[in-house]
Amino acid sequence: MEAQRFPDDFDGIAAGAPVNGLIVQNTFHHAWPAVINVDPETGMYILLASKLPLIHAAVLQACVSIDGVADGVIDNPQVCHFNPQSMLCAKGLTASTCLSQAEVNVVRQIHDGATDSNGVHLEQVVSRE
């Protein structure tokens, strides 16, 4: 706070960690998935934690090698164009290996970020491209 309010008090500042945008994090990144993951008709959650490893594996498979190194790290998520529709259950697949259309919709909405009732994004997206 001292550095922000009185920068002339310093010849230089060595900062080890930038400030987190906690308002954005707590408002959008925590609340949005909870809000859009509830079925309005039943009040039940749509996407359950048991599906997260399946989704994680699919995203890694689609995007981890974009930088040319298959190291388990997605270096630039903005260039990853994973389509959750690719995980939609086809006839004959068990629900533990794929997603229902409702689950696909939740994954897409979480990925796309918080929007208002008119579809306007509620946070600024910064591209590294």
Image: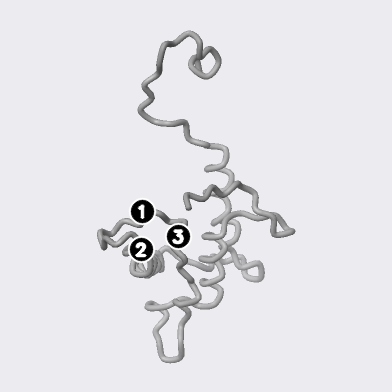
Residue drawn 65% across the image and 49% down it: 122
Establish if 87 lies above or below 114: below
**Mark 3 near mark 1, Cβ–Cβ under 8 Å?**
no
Q: Report the residue at 43% width, 31% height from top.
A: 18
Residue 75's disc number:
1
Secondary structure under tag 1 reads: loop
Kindly tell me whether residue 57 is visible in this rendering: yes
Is 83 or 69 nearer to us in this picture? 69
Tell me the CA gap for discs 1 and 2.
8 Å
Residues marked 2 and 3 touching at CB (< 8 Å): yes
Relative image position of residue 28 (x, y in whole percent) = 57, 48
**Residue found at the very far top of the displayed protein:** 9
* Direction bottom: furthest residue: 92
Residue found 40% across the figure and 86% down from its top: 93
Residue 42: image quadrant is bottom right
Where residue 91 appears, x then y in whole percent? 45, 91
For mark 2, give the secondary structure: loop
Q: Earlier in the sequence, mark 1 or mark 2?
A: 2
Q: Amino acid at mark 3?
A: Val
Quick check: 7 left or right of 92?
right
Q: Sequence-wise, which precedes: disc 2 or disc 3?
A: 2
Where does label 3 land, which residue? Answer: 79
Residues packed near mark 3 inside 10 Å, few (<14), some (14 to 19) or many (20 plus)? some
Q: Which residue is mark 2?
A: 66
Give the amino acid at mark 1: Asp
Of residue 68 and residue 43, the one placed in the foreground of this image is: 68
Mark 2 vs mark 3, CA separation in Å: 8 Å
Give how far across and how far down residue 30 sits, in percent: 52, 49
**Secondary element type, mark 3:** helix
Q: Mark 2 packing: few (<14 Cα in 10 Å), some, or many (20+)? A: some
